[in-house]
Image (cartoon, rainbow, N blue to C red):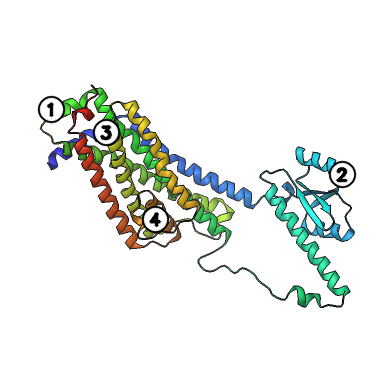
Amino acid sequence: MKNNVKHMLKKELKEMFRDKKSLSMMLIIPIMIPLLIIGMSALFEMQTNKPQEDYNKVGFTYELSETEKTILENVGIDYEENTVEKLEEGVQNGDVNMYVTKEDANYIFHSRRDDKSSYTERLVSTYFESYKQYLQTAYLNNHDMPAEDILNIITYGYAPTDADDGTSEYFANYITTYAFLFIIMAITVSATYPATDATAGEKERGTLETLLTFPIKSKDIILGKFLSVSISSIITGLLSLILMVTSLVVANGMFTIYEEVSLMPSITSLAFALVVIIAYSCLISGLCISIASKAKTFKEAQSALTPLTFISFFPSMIAFMIEIKSSALLSMVPFLNFTLLFTDITNGEVDILNIVLMIASTIIFIAVMLSMIIKQYKSENVLFTN
């Protein structure tokens, strides 16, 4: 039995490595990871260090006092006074980022919703907070009230803890977790083609019928095909991990937003990440073979496997966006568990129990899928195209 599986594995690996499309899916897709990390880091840096001159042009439809003008200059707002029509035209053509109208004591912001509007809104809000505090102080002083005591009756502020280094830490965790999610997608995409070729492709070419004439059990055939696709997926995952770590080191030295943090994962974190990658590669390989085995043509199998990329990636994105926390129960939920473990690895909060439960549940799911495929291969209706 072991020799049969070994021979099947050799056969499948030879065919896989001879096929240029299989190799391209396995090796080229991971190259997207450095582009993702460097590109997103550049975007974060651009947003963080956006020049104030790009979003500080603000118009006012009413006459400003000297005090207001002084505060505007201190805040760094390039202001102008004009009519609503002129300022509206300025907003539309980009000469003005925002204009403010006044109704009694109510001030209303008007802007075109673009990538600069949120920056302008924060800047204008800072101005109005300063102006409001000036008016409150003047009012209290005019009524012989201790403005300082009343306005500063409490004070508050933010002090980062050891586990929270502010913006830099947020960007670092975000980019690392997102890179891990992309590894999941890369593995999924790379597993679809070899799984399709090893099952539906052989049916379409007629080579599977010849293979079944040899004294080899269906179990050995499936194990050989499963192991070959898993090896292909693991190679993709390993290459993706290497490129991810390399890109994180490069980004760490290239962008100022990471000056206060280290993007380089610890050796322990990388070891856990490798375990998760291997487990996911085996699970997705078994699933791809299970689905592709039911198809009678290569095209039919590709169509059936296309949604799998989104199905595997969608729970990951949802969990990442709404910040679902890992638990022993969720560690046994397929697809979701890998994302949660990657998030824990990024934050340095890996629970060994969750890793063990993930491995155990993955083995069970793979065993169930392989047993189903073996039964399929004993059915002529599933095996042959005619």
Give the spatial CA distance, label 2 vs label 1: 87 Å
Please report whichever mark, 2 or 3, sits nearer to the chain's N-terminal start: 2
Label 4 or label 3, whichever lies nearer to me, is 3
Of 57 and 247, the residue lying toward us: 57
Q: CA distance from mark 4 to mark 2?
A: 57 Å
Q: Nearer the viewer, mark 3 or mark 1?
A: 3
Q: Which residue is mark 3?
A: 293
For the residues labelled 3 and 1, say whether their Cβ atoms are less than 8 Å apart: no
Query: Marks 3 and 4: in contact by CB < 8 Å?
Result: no
Q: Position of residue 200 (x, y in %)?
A: 28, 29
List x then y, in percent, for residue 27. 38, 37
Q: Residue at x 37, y 42 (%)?
A: 187
39 or 113: nearer the viewer: 113
For residue 168, side relative to residue 62 (left or right): left
Q: Return the residue at label 1.
A: 213
33 left or right of 259?
left
At mark 1, the secondary structure is: loop
Q: CA distance from mark 4 to mark 1?
A: 44 Å
**N-term-proximal mark, 2 vs 1:** 2
Instruction: Tell me which corner region of the image, top left, top right, bottom left or bottom right, holds residue 314.
Output: top left
Name the mark on residue 83: 2
Q: Earlier in the sequence, mark 4 or mark 2?
A: 2
Q: Which residue lies under the disc numbered 4? A: 341
Task: Look at label 3 and name its amino acid.
Answer: Ser
